[in-house]
Amino acid sequence: MSTSTELRVDRSAQALGSTLAQKLIARAAAQSHVNVGDVLTCQVDLAMFHDSSGPRRLKPMLDDIGAQIWDRNKVVLVLDHYVPARDADAEKIIRITRDVAKEWQLPHVIDSEGICHVVLPERGHLRPGHFCVGGDSHSPTGGAFGTYMFGIGATEMLGVVATGEIWVQVPQTLRMVWQGALQKGVCAKDMMLHMIGKFGMNGGNYQAVEFAGDTVRGLSMQERMTLSNMSAEMGAQVGLIAADSTTREYLKSVGVSPADIEQCDYFETDDTAECQRFDFDASQLSPQVAAPHSPENTKAVAEFAHIKPSVAYIGACTGAKLVDLRAAAEVLKGRKVAPGVQLMVAPASARDQAQAQREGVMQILTDAGASVLPNACGACAGYGGTFEEGATVISSTARNFQGRMGPASVQVYLASPATVAASALTGHISDVREVLA
Amino acid sequence: MTQGAAEFHKVWRVGANIDTDALAPGAYMKHGIEVIAAHCLEVHRPDFAAGVKPGDVLVAGPNFGIGSSREQAAGALKQLGISAVVAPSYSGLFFRNAFNLGLLLLTCPEAETLQENARVQLDLKDIPVVKTAQGQILTCHSVPSFLMDMVSAGGLVNVLKQRMAANAVSTLS
């Protein structure tokens, strides 16, 4: 931690303490202390965009206003939404994206190697203390690293790439404190579906959600990412988790240098900070399922035992990371999916898939009958390759809006990767705890 | 603002939790805004895109615009000529996108009392109000002046253009 930051934080803590969100914004706005409700201009440490929100939209506008990218080293471009191309339109979008990347001489381009929210930290781009924006609504995923990261649209991204700045209103903090041990088979996705069910799709009211407590401290980085990721489905601007030794270990594992790790700002919410606190007992949580057509239609898995999915989908930044693939494999090891169920697995990144391959996880999944899809957003984005008319789907993704993943008749149930696997195995929506017992 | 308080706007009604995927369906995201706009809200109101006229107002329930960051959700409404959306609450991400594209959003706790086909006036003073032809007056939350300026300018692109031009002038002088 840099000395100057320590001084800044200590001073701000003297009066009423600050939340993690306030400290992150104060740093980005070069203020000693910020108050909830203040509207401030922040300096952006990193801007991420993808093939849909990025070059095809940004270049014409950037040319139109006659501006240049403020700092190309702070930009990461990921091709994940339209890859692999399904038609001529997608091909054109990909071609434009690659051409513009060359023209702009972008040093950080991740092409067809996974979903932006997963490959960004995987390549060491996310640092605790930083202030980042992403051209995608699941950008709060970055909050798992103690980073203030949120999603913006393409025009607002134009403002960022032209100026390096963006305005933000300092949010209140809703602090979700989880204590206790999760039962076997219950995971971060279940925690998040439970919270979305409790607070609703806009319950976060564009404020900051912070996840804390022993349970959260005990989660791996990728599980933490699942919490932060679905803060979007709570309508929060960000979903923050204070960086700690787990974060440092992750950064080390992806090749961030010890010096760089030390230089990060490891902020935490002060005990005296004002926030709304909500307490949860992790040991009481059962696997959760969200019924069509909203992530807030969440109930315990037992309510859905009569539902017989025709498709079981393990995909997306939310639910197909290495940790998710492992969870599915634990359920499916040595078993086959039920007749009439199509299991699809779209690993969230090429690196995660390669590691899953080395561990035998991919073999278990394919032996169980899974077809393996490309490392891309796939059916989750609904941009192509969606499910067929009348399909009933159990999915580890983030959103089950009507019409998102196929025709309006498609019924999508959201659940954890473990629950998706358990349901594929039995042929009806099932309690993974019973399958693992 | 371009809308005078005297002008009447026809109301189109939709419900709560209208998501971005309904406003800008994913299957059409590879196309330009004209195509996306033609399918705007079709999952809820197949009559909307074809029937809406420039100047009309869209009135919705709470949590309008939840979901994706795709600004085409706001862009489609702008493309169709919607002069304002009136709803009790919005997704924060959609809220930013709308103003960045010059689309006015009015946060109106009583929005849902407005009926389909009602005719309303928008009075955009410090505390904006929506007035019905029957004399009902609904108070909206105030819109920060920098966001009203964004609507007046026609969106962030124009604001940035003005800023770039001003910078160029100051560099020259």
Image (tube, coloured by chain):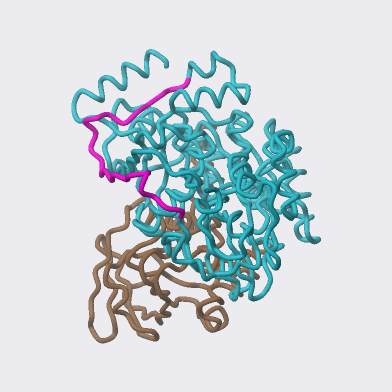
Classified by dominant secondary structure, the portion drawn in magenta counts as loop
Residue A352 is situated, as x and y percent measured from the top left of the image, at 67, 38
The image shows residue B35, relative to residue B71, as above or below, that is below
Residue A139 colored in magenta in the image? no
Q: Nearer the viewer, residue A289 or A163?
A: A289
- Looking at the rendered image, the quarter that the N terminus of chain A falls into is top left
Q: Which residues are magenta?
A: A264-287
* Chain B image colour: brown
Residue located at (76% from left, 37% from top): A102
Residue A63 is situated, as x and y percent measured from the top left of the image, at 65, 46
Residue located at (55% from left, 27% from top): A250
Residue A431 is situated, as x and y percent measured from the top left of the image, at 50, 57
The image shows residue A432, relative to residue A117, as above or below, that is below
Q: Does residue A313 appear in the picture of this structure? A: yes
Residue A271 colored in magenta in the image? yes
Q: Nearer the viewer, residue A245 or A272?
A: A245
Q: How many marks?
A: 0
Residue located at (48% from left, 43% from top): A184
* Chain A image colour: cyan
Q: Does residue A69 appear in the picture of this structure? A: no
Residue located at (62% from left, 26% from top): A254
Residue A171 placement: quadrant:
top left
